[in-house]
Amino acid sequence: MKRGALAWGVGVAALVVAVLGALAVGRFPIEPAQLWAILTGTETGTASIVFWNIRAPRVGAAILVGASLAAAGAAFQGMFRNPLASPDLLGVSAGASLGAVLGIFLGLPVAAVQGLAFAGGIAAVAAVAALSSAVRGQGDPVLVLILAGIALGALMGAAISLLKILADPYNQLPAITFWLLGTLSAATREDILAAAPAALLGLVVLLLLRWRLNLLTLGEDEARALGVNTTALRAFAVAGATLATAAVTALAGAVGWIGLVVPHMARMLGGPDLRRLIPLSALLGAAFLLAVDTLARVAGRTELPLGILTAVLGTPLFLWLLVRARRGGAA
Amino acid sequence: MTTLLAAQGLSVGHGRRVVAAGISFALEAGQVLCLLGPNGGGKTTLLRTLLGLIPPLAGEVLLEAAPLASLSRREVAHRLAYVPQAAPGGFAYAAREVVAMGRAARLPLLAAPGAHDHALAEAALDRLGISHLADRPVTELSGGERQLVLIARALVQDARCLVLDEPTASLDFGNQALVLREVRALAVRDGLAVLMTTHHPDHALLVADAAMLLHGGAMIGPMPSAELITPARLRAAYGVDAVVGALQTPQGERLVCAPLVGPP
């Protein structure tokens, strides 16, 4: 119980610091005292306009994206019993990327690009699930599912490469490249409101199933002997994770690393029990992506793509965790 | 006496490959039945078939007189609890959480164990004398302790029939005796039906009412352990000479089975 309290404390503190930091830096810094005035309605000047129209949507978007990717990653790592699993394991990111790249290639408006990305992510995972249930036979269903995800992911990667070659190198290609690395610079309040319902629904599904997902970590035979319909449970959880991931990928582009690295941080803090790990991952993922996005806004003269920063910050962190775990720490 | 688990003319195997055929037995409440047989003889395949994890190739499994094939996973778990081998590794859940997982079949899809379930887990740990381990991560427990935790998990499942896969494997002498005593108590004290596999014919003589021997694709028995376990059958199944004899103990006379290794 002590460990739980500590973990929640760290998670909440990290998010609060990240939010205050995100508000306090930028071209129009908003101090905590000002924030109170804005929230209570006593401040209605420029700061209020900046807050409601620019800063708050962006902070909200970063929280939504980080929380969704990290929670989906934690659920995948648990149910596939694999610490290297991430939300794009079953092709949701590749499918969403293909959809978005196709939209950019065809010169469609932003909303249509986002819609194609969302649909592409869902369709890719649906295709992987259908393919794996068609070829399963007597084999290990989880292994077949993952291999189908890798195979279709490679195919979609090839299609994306083809579109990049065919794309107009002056306008479309930079847009595609930027999208594939992820960014929140263009996210508007409307974009966020469009993505939020699906992302939140996916998160709620994962949160409601989180105790039962623990049972999948025991392995297929043991879970079934305990009375769990593993096929149905896995399908529900994959659907929830895919919904959340596709929605936030449509909003922010293909932001890597969060879904892989953040669950490991959460596990070191709060242990492997998914009842704690999924919400804690969401909290830490929100804080981490918000911090990274704040850095992306202010670090360079032009905005850096999120994917570059999550990898630059995430890789050393991940290696450090790996070394710690190898030395006999908790994992 | 009610029959809780029965097999009728059962063939087990994978795909089209039959591993063992012609298996029939009936297990009643309050009874311990031991499944013996050499490695690779089909013990695990039979257990997985009885649990409904793989389909039978022929014949039928009955759980409390209902055909296994007609039951959902949840309904199977209400009638039959499985105690796997206590393999090391896995996730570092606290023992009480592992035990509470046994409630899965009794809880709705979106529910987590509540106060009632945790009280049952508490009681099961207490019944096996391991309350003091409740908050320890299972990865830090000894093999014997982990095995008892898994038995406690099966108890909260609230099924009347228990299937244990080699509960004494990789345990030391003391832990083997501890687990065997609990297995016996589950049948005698709690009236559960217990099917266990073991590598030790002597364990069948010690705790089982009946035993059966699976080897060469066929089943011998079930019959009273003392009848089944003879030097000739052990020689045929395991390729080793053994003696079976009566030993005077403080708890009365009991049959003992011991292997002979002969001069080098």
Image (cartoon, coloured by chain):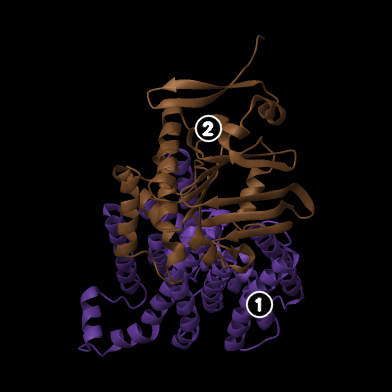
- Is disc 1 surrounded by few (<14), some (14 to 19) or many (20+) residues within 10 Å? some
- The answer, for residue B142, to whether it is visible in the render is no
Instruction: Tell me if A325 is positioned left or right of B58 in this view.
Output: left
Q: Which residue is label 2 attached to?
A: B205
Q: Residue at x 22, y 80 (%)?
A: A36
Camera-side residue of B114 and A105: B114
Picture colour for chain B: brown
Q: Which residue is mark 1?
A: A123
Q: Nearer the viewer, residue A10 or B243?
A: B243
Question: Number of callouts in the render?
Answer: 2
State whether residue B219 is above or below residue B11: above
Numbered disc 1: what chain? A
In the image, what residue occupies the spot 45% across and 25% down?
A: B253
Q: CA distance from mark 1 to mark 2?
A: 59 Å
Q: Secondary structure at mark 1?
A: helix
Instruction: Please name the amino acid that badge 2 sits on.
Output: Leu
Residue B163: x and y in percent read 53, 49
Q: Name chain A's colour.
A: purple
Extreme residue in the front direction = B1
Q: Nearer the viewer, residue B87 or A34?
A: B87
Q: Answer yes or no: do the residues labelled 1 and 2 have beta carbons within 8 Å?
A: no
| Mark 1 residue type | Ala
Q: Residues within 10 Å of mark 2 (few under 14, many from 20)?
A: many
Front position among marks 1 and 2: 2
Image: A175 above or below A226: below
* Camera-side residue of B187 and B77: B187
User: In the rendered view, would you say B35 is above or below B51?
Assistant: above
